[in-house]
Amino acid sequence: MLDDLAHSTGGSTSSDNDLLGGFNRLATPPEYVYYLNFYPRDLKPDGKYHDIKVKLTDGKGFSVQARKGYWAPSHEEDAATMATREIGEAVFARDEVHDLPVDMRTAVSRGEGAAAELAVTAEIDLKLLHYVKADERNSDDVMVVAAVFDHNGNFLEGKQHLLQLRLRDETLAGLEQRPPETLKSTFNLSPGTYLVRLVVRSVQGGAMTTTSGSVEIP
């Protein structure tokens, strides 16, 4: 029962009498980790369990830990739910998309002690977003996630912001003279090499920008 539960979710167990050895095997991460995201096309919201199988074309010397299937939703996703799911998938992907006017900036500052502060700033050009007119306002909700991974690709920490825009026509016209909006996330990190991942998603418009960069903490 315990083995079935662990393996069905992509995990593992240790059930022998060597508790220390089993703990070390479970707690020690592999040297290399690859994340594979899967989302079925033409997903039917039938609320049923669907089997999936992940295998390697050349599996010599390698093993795969993956979920055995997924539960389909029982209803259609609304815009906010879809945006949250797509952002979660994009954080662990490595491709880059540039559908929104966003630039990423990183800066490292040294504080007290061994840790340094990494600032990840998303600069968003608000005048180039795709607004939806509702209740006499130009509306868009912009979700921003900054995430940090270590040099082996292991997720360390993420920060999220939500920018809710409800602009009158005159305010929207005034954005031509306004500098980009900046949203900053900060992380305290020890010396090392890190991968920074920034994902920005428009809830109403559906567009997304994803970008990554390497940061060295001396």
Image (cartoon, grey):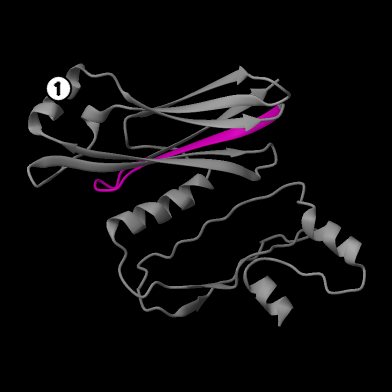
* Residue bearing mark 1: 174
Where is residue 100 drawn, in percent x and y? Answer: 32, 35
Instruction: Report the residue at 92% width, 73% height from top.
Output: 17
Instruction: Report the residue at 14% width, 29% height from top.
Output: 172
Where is residue 179 drawn, in percent x and y? Answer: 28, 19
Magenta includes 117?
A: no
Instruction: Report the residue at 70% width, 29% height from top.
Output: 190
Q: Residues within 10 Å of mark 1 (few under 14, many from 20)?
A: few
Occupied quadrant, residue 170: top left
How many numbered marks have been drawn onto this rendered protein structure? 1
Q: Residue furthest front?
A: 112
Q: Is residue 108 above or below residue 126?
A: above
Occupied quadrant, residue 166: top left
Q: Quadrant of the C terminus?
A: top right
Q: Amino acid at mark 1?
A: Gly
Judged left or right of residue 14, residue 121 is left
Judged left or right of residue 48, residue 206 is left
Where is residue 158 drawn, in percent x and y? Answer: 53, 42
Q: Quadrant of the N terminus?
A: bottom right
Instruction: Report the residue at 68% width, 29% height from top.
Output: 193
Q: Residue furthest bottom?
A: 1
Q: Is residue 140 above or below residue 127?
A: below
Q: Is residue 28 above or below residue 156?
A: below
Magenta includes 205?
A: yes
Range of residues picked out in magenta: 192-208
Judged left or right of residue 56, residue 27 is right
Q: Residue furthest right?
A: 18
Where is residue 148 drawn, in percent x and y? Answer: 58, 37
Q: Which element carries disc 1, helix, strand or loop?
A: helix
- State the residue in front, 62 or 179: 179
- State the residue in front, 119 or 113: 113
Q: Main secondary structure of the magenta part?
A: strand
